[in-house]
Image: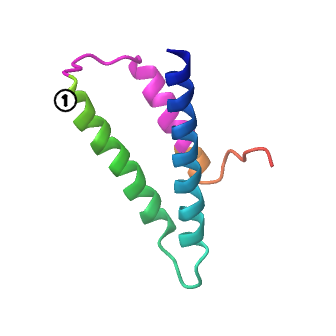
Amino acid sequence: RHARHLLVIGGLTVCFTLHNYMQELIMSQPGFNFGAILAFLDVLGVTFFSGVERVLTNEKHRVAPWTAYITLCIFLCMRYLGAVPLAS
């Protein structure tokens, strides 16, 4: 059971690392001015496929309280607008 869990964690880490690396390669291309649209489409894809997963697994209830969603949205909007710098 632990080996399977570690395999899933490792697989996710590799996939996210490759995704982020390729996204940075795309955004660093000269003349590419669609970073905000690329980020929006990325979030839209994650939202869509997580919705599909919820339908396929018959998950009907919300896990986190609405305040968590609102807090996360506010933080992400502030971060996107540059109001909250991340540590370098």
Q: Residue 42: give x, y in percent of width and height.
A: 41, 54
- Please state which of residues 32 and 71 is positioned toward the viewer in this rendering: 32
For the point 52% across and 55% down, the residue is 19
Asked if the stretch drawn in magenta spans residue 73, the answer is yes
Q: In this view, does 19 lie above or below 46?
A: below
Q: Which amino acid does the dot numbered 1 rest on?
A: Leu
Judge the density around disc 1: few (<14), some (14-19), many (≥20) Cα neighbours within 10 Å. Answer: few
**From the viewer's perspective, is residue 8 above or below residue 2?**
below
Residue 41 belongs to the span the image colors magenta:
no
Q: Mark 1 sits on what residue?
A: 56
Q: Residue at image x 57%, y 26%?
A: 6
62 left or right, relative to 79: left
Q: In the rendering, at what x and y percent does residue 73 appear? A: 48, 37
Q: In this view, does 64 lie to the left or right of 15?
A: left
Residue at 52% from the left image edge and 22% from the top image edge: 5
> The residue tagged with tag 1: helix, strand or loop?
helix
Q: Residue furthest bottom?
A: 31
Looking at the rendering, the stretch of residues picked out in magenta corresponds to 58-76
In the picture provided, is 19 more to the left or to the right than 61? right
Q: x, y percentage for residue 69?
A: 43, 28
